[in-house]
Image (spheres, rainbow, N blue to C red):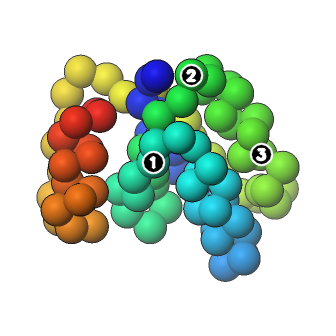
Amino acid sequence: MKCYIVTFEAADVAVRQRIRDRLKSYPKYCPVHKHCWAIMTDQKAAEVRDFLTPLLGPKDRMFVIRSGTESAWRNSYGPKNNEWLKKNL
């Protein structure tokens, strides 16, 4: 599986929650912050985008990128998320 970073902007609170719920359907996932998640999947970036796109409104935004060779962060959502990020990014 590959790790992808998914960021999104949605004006509607309910849309943001539906996106988070759909991201939780991936085999492995970790919220990086409120509108940015890391997911593990065998899909390609475009397939991830296409899976989430039906939830978005016409002015909402999303960005999907495969995790690379280097990462850094500060104040993850606790030790569990911190360990997930260390292992998978």
- Tell me the amino acid under the disc marked 3: Thr
* Image quadrant where residue 69 sits: top left
Q: Earlier in the sequence, mark 1 or mark 2?
A: 1
- Tell me the amino acid under the disc marked 1: Tyr
**Image mark for residue 29:** 1
What x and y, as percent, mark residue 23? 59, 52
Question: Closer to the camera: disc 1 or disc 3?
Answer: 1
Q: Is residue 84 left or right of residue 46?
A: left
Q: Residue at x 70, y 27 (%)?
A: 47
Q: Residue at x 17, y 62 (%)?
A: 79
Q: Residues within 10 Å of mark 2 (few under 14, many from 20)?
A: few
Q: Residues within 10 Å of mark 1 (few under 14, many from 20)?
A: many
What x and y, as percent, mark residue 22? 67, 55
Q: Earlier in the sequence, mark 1 or mark 3?
A: 1
Q: Residue at x 41, y 58 (%)?
A: 31
What x and y, as percent, mark residue 88? 29, 34
Label 1 close to label 3 by CB (< 8 Å)? no
Label 1 close to label 2 by CB (< 8 Å)? no
* Image quadrant where residue 59 sits: bottom right
- Tag 3 residue: 53
Tell me the element at label 3.
Answer: helix
Q: Residue at x 77, y 56 (%)?
A: 56
How far apart, in angstroms, are the residues tagged by discs 1 and 3?
Answer: 18 Å
Q: Is residue 29 left or right of residue 53?
A: left
Q: Is residue 14 left or right of residue 24?
A: right
Q: Of 52 and 30, which appears nearest the observer?
A: 30
- Tag 2 residue: 42
- Tell me the amino acid under the disc marked 2: Asp
Q: Earlier in the sequence, mark 3 or mark 2?
A: 2
Q: What residue occupies the far bottom of the structure in this picture?
A: 13
